[in-house]
Amino acid sequence: KLDLSRNLLSGTIPGDHLRDCAKLTLLDLSNNRLSGTIPAGLGNITSLDIALNLSWNNLTGDIPSELGRLTQLQFLDLSHNQLSGRIPQDLALLDISILDLSNNQLQGLIPTQNGFNTRNNQSVFASNPGLCGFPLPPCNITNNGSITATRQQRQSLLLWIRFLDYASPWAFLIAYLISLAVGTFIFIPILKI
């Protein structure tokens, strides 16, 4: 076990050195000032079977798909960082008991394989503005894989379209009456001259 949480550590995670820790079962680097990306080499520490906690740091970049190799991992907390990109499909294959990816900048569709399709707790994925899909609101995926609108955005657009459908005859009538009034006050005096 290696618990270095709450030590004001700064810099990057030394992934190359940690991969040599063949008997490491728990790695907790939470509540520090670590920056940079999550090293893909952490996925090679297959002895990690209890926990990997990197929460409450300043980590950026994508979640490495190599973390999907940690098949015995029970606890994964990457919350409260600035991680971006999509959740890797390989990560969704893990059967993790406790997962927290909240408060990042993740985006795209939440994978639905194995462990992720049973996670009906929205707080696991909360505060990731670009993230969608169960258990969060659904998203609309185009052919190229980009998200075009969330369910809420589509509902707002439908309400606006319905309003315009209802309002358009009235808008036409109001515009006609205004043009008639303007024409009457401008052109009639001109015709009298």
Image: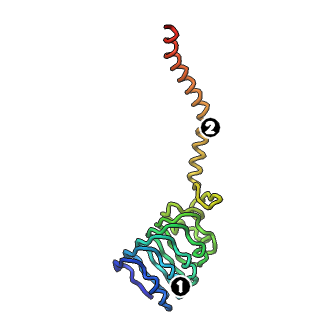
Number of other residues with Cα within 10 Å of mark 1, as a class: few under 14, some 14 to 19, many 20 or more:
many
Q: Position of residue 18 (x, y in %)?
A: 46, 86
Image vertical order of residue 105 relative to residue 98, above or below: above
Q: The disc labelled 2 sits on which kind of residue? A: Asp
**Labels 1 & 2 near each other (Cβ < 8 A):** no
- Farthest residue to the bottom: give it: 23
Q: Tell me the kind of residue under disc 1.
A: Asn
SS for dot 2: helix
Per the image, the residue denoted by label 2 is 165
Q: What is the distance, in whole Å, between disc 1 and disc 2 at their CAs?
A: 58 Å
The quadrant in which the N terminus is found is bottom left
Q: Position of residue 147 (x, y in %)?
A: 58, 58
Residue in front for this viewpoint, 32 or 121: 32
Q: Give the x, y percent position of residue 61.
A: 48, 70
* Residue 167 place in picture, x, y as percent: 59, 34
Which mark is on residue 121?
none
- The nearer-to-camera label among 1 and 2 is 1
In-image side of 104 versus 31 (left or right):
right
Mark 1 = which residue? 44
Residue found farthest to the right:
143
Quadrant in the picture for residue 46: bottom right
Which residue is at a point 45% across and 70% down the rendered structure image? 60
Q: Residue visible at 54% across and 82% down? A: 73
